[in-house]
C-alpha cells in the first residue's frame, strides 16, 4: 500500500509540473501563473498542491532543475550517436534545436528566468547552465588533446552561442530554422578549429 501511495504521490507531482509547463507560452511567464490555475490544470484541489510543493517558487525551481536535467541527458545521448562520418557538432546542434522545437515552454522558462527578477530563479538557471558547461568541458577533455583551461573556455563559448541561437530558433519560420542550424554548426566549428589552432600555436612558443 505504501508503494502505491508513493507512486500516486509522484504521479500527482508530475501532473503539477506538467500543468505549469502547459500554461507557459510566448505570452505567459511563470510569474504570471497562479497556484489555483496550476492546481485546476492538474486536476487537484489547491490545498493538495502543498503536499508536493511549499509554494509556487519551489515549483518553479523544480521546473528549472528538471528542464536542465532533461536537456543534459539529451545532449549526452547525442554525443554517443556520432560516428566516423557524422559530425558531433552537427548532431549536437540538431539535437539541441529539436529540444527547443518540441519543448518551447521549457526553453522559454530557462531563457526568461535566466535574467528574471527573482534571484533564486537566476541562480537556479545559472547553476543549470554551469552543469551543462562543465559536462561539455569534461567531454572535450576526454575527446580532444586540448588543455583543461582551453576546454573550459571553448565549452563556455559553445554553450553561449547555442543558447542564444536557440532563442532565435524559438519563433523562427522553417526556412530560418534550417539557416540557424547551419549557422550555429559553422560557428561552433570555427570555435573548435580556433581552439585547436590556439593550442598548437602556444605549444610552438
Image: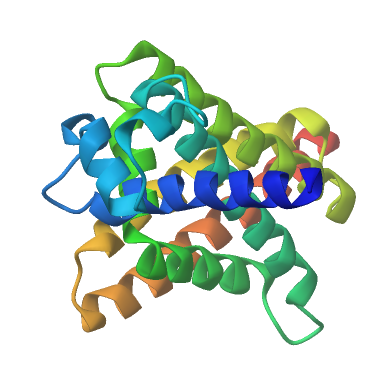
Which residue shows up at 40% across the image and 71% down it? 181
Which residue shows up at 33% across the image and 39% down it? 45
Rendering coords of residue 89 (x, y %)? 62, 66
Give the vertical position of 141 relative to 85 (above or below).
above
Residue that sits furthest to the front in the current view:
1
Give the vertical position of 88 relative to 198 (above or below).
below
Foreground pick, 143 / 34? 34
Residue that sits furthest to the left in the current view:
27
Q: Quadrant of residue 152?
A: top right
- Residue 205 at least partly seen: no
Foreground pick, 197 / 158? 158
Rendering coords of residue 57 (x, y %)? 38, 22
Foreground pick, 76 / 149? 76
Give the vertical position of 197 relative to 52 (above or below).
below
Foreground pick, 196 / 46? 46
Q: Quadrant of residue 154?
A: top right
Residue that sits furthest to the bottom in the current view:
85
Q: Is residue 29 left or right of residue 166?
A: left
Rendering coords of residue 151 (x, y %)? 73, 38
Q: Quadrant of the C terminus?
A: top right
- Residue 72 at least partly seen: yes
Rendering coords of residue 129 (x, y %)? 54, 35
Amino acid at each position: 500500500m505504501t508503494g502505491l501511495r508513493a507512486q500516486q504521490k509522484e504521479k500527482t507531482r508530475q501532473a503539477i509540473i506538467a500543468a505549469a509547463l502547459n500554461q507557459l507560452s510566448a505570452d505567459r511567464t511563470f510569474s504570471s501563473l497562479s497556484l489555483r490555475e496550476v492546481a485546476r490544470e492538474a486536476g487537484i484541489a489547491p490545498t493538495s498542491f502543498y503536499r508536493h510543493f511549499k509554494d509556487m517558487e519551489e515549483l518553479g525551481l523544480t521546473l528549472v532543475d528538471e528542464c536542465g536535467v532533461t536537456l543534459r541527458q539529451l545532449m549526452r545521448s547525442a554525443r554517443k550517436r556520432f560516428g566516423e562520418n557524422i559530425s558531433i557538432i552537427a548532431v549536437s546542434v540538431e539535437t539541441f534545436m529539436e529540444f527547443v522545437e518540441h519543448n518551447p515552454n521549457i526553453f522559454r522558462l530557462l531563457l526568461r528566468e535566466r535574467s528574471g527578477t527573482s534571484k533564486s530563479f537566476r541562480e537556479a538557471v545559472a547553476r543549470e547552465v554551469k552543469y551543462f558547461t562543465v559536462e561539455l568541458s569534461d567531454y572535450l577533455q576526454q575527446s580532444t588533446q586540448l588543455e583543461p583551461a582551453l576546454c573550459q573556455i571553448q565549452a563556455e563559448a559553445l554553450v553561449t552561442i547555442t543558447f542564444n541561437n536557440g532563442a532565435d530558433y524559438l519563433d523562427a519560420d522553417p526556412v530560418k530554422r534550417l539557416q540557424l542550424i547551419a549557422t550555429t554548426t559553422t560557428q561552433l566549428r570555427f570555435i573548435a578549429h580556433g581552439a585547436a589552432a590556439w593550442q598548437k600555436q602556444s605549444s610552438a612558443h
